[in-house]
Image: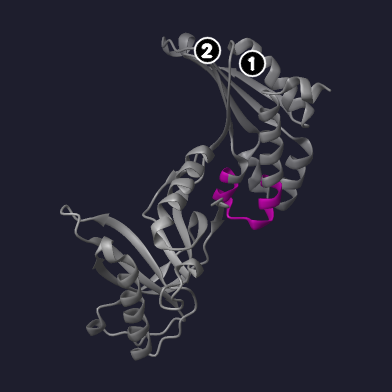
Amino acid sequence: MNYRIGLCETAPQTVVQIPLEIPPDRLSDAIVAGVERMAEVASRAGLTASGAPTITFHHESPAGDSIKVDFGLPIEPAPNLGPASGAQLMVLPPTLVARTCHRGGYGGLDAAYRALGEWVREAGCTPIGPPTEAYLVGPDEVSDPRQLITEIRLPVAPAPAIAVHLDGNLTDAATRTREALHRQGFGVVAEIDMQAILREKAGEHIGDHLILEVCHPRLAARALEVDQRAGLLLPSRIVLREDETGVLIEAADPEVQVRTLAQPALNDIAAEAHRLLGAALAALHHPAAVAG
């Protein structure tokens, strides 16, 4: 099965949550029982469901005979849930997740988890919490496993940089990087030789390490029109440093940086800057195609 995977930010929601331990060898039956219990608790408390039931997995017990999970059910906010129910109301904040959907029985979920994990690693993201399964079509609704639809959500922190690795030395890589940036509309406004600075000012010795401060005039003007604080994020920073096999080039991701300002109007500008920086770095692997 081919899995479509992407990043999205979940909406804030109120969830009724029940911690349980379920047997891994009877997962379908445990899901049905847990979902039914969630529905019963919500009904007794007069709560109205507003989304698909979920399970958040924590860890297996040492004996491996049970899995600690939290069953959850998004609901319309209400204060009628008592402690005797064994459940609690949780207000979940927006969370960035990598997600994919699996169609079919739960025996095939491992493939979905592997595909999701590989995508997260390749995207440079960092998992920051346990996975959650949302039962868009669950075993309480259909008897044919082929009709099951399960969404897997993994909370992640985005990669802080757009990166590329090149063979060769830093001098050549820096020249090619300046040219690739220029083709995408960026100008280099400053260069910082960290190797020389640390050697002269602190007596420290490091490998070749160059920082380029670059600016895209059109995008910078748009950003400053939206919010003068955007100047704190300008210009963009690109770091080139030699390692054992060549040169690592990393550009600070504008989409990650702009989140610190919490200004939605800057998101489209940051997305375009991300695209142009990514195109510049990607072109370093295919200079002939770009030149042609």
Q: How busy is the neighbourhood of tag 2: few (under 14 within 10 Å), some, or many (20 plus)?
A: some
The Cα atoms of the two marked residues, 2 and 1, are separated by 12 Å
Residue 1 numbered tag: none
Way the structure is coloured: one colour
Query: Disc 2 or disc 1, which is closer to the eye?
Result: 1
**Quadrant location of residue 33?**
bottom left
Q: Which residues are magenta?
A: 256-270
- Residue 16: where, in percent of width, then height? 37, 76
Q: Residue at x 31, y 80 (%)?
A: 37
Q: Main secondary structure of the magenta part?
A: helix
Residue 173 numbered tag: 1
| Amino acid of disc 1 | Ala
Q: Residue at x 69, y 40 (%)?
A: 275
Q: Residue at x 45, y 64 (%)?
A: 93
Magenta stretch encompasses residue 263: yes
- Residue 57: where, in percent of width, then height? 33, 59
- Residue 13: where, in percent of width, then height? 47, 71
Q: Which residue is mark 2?
A: 208
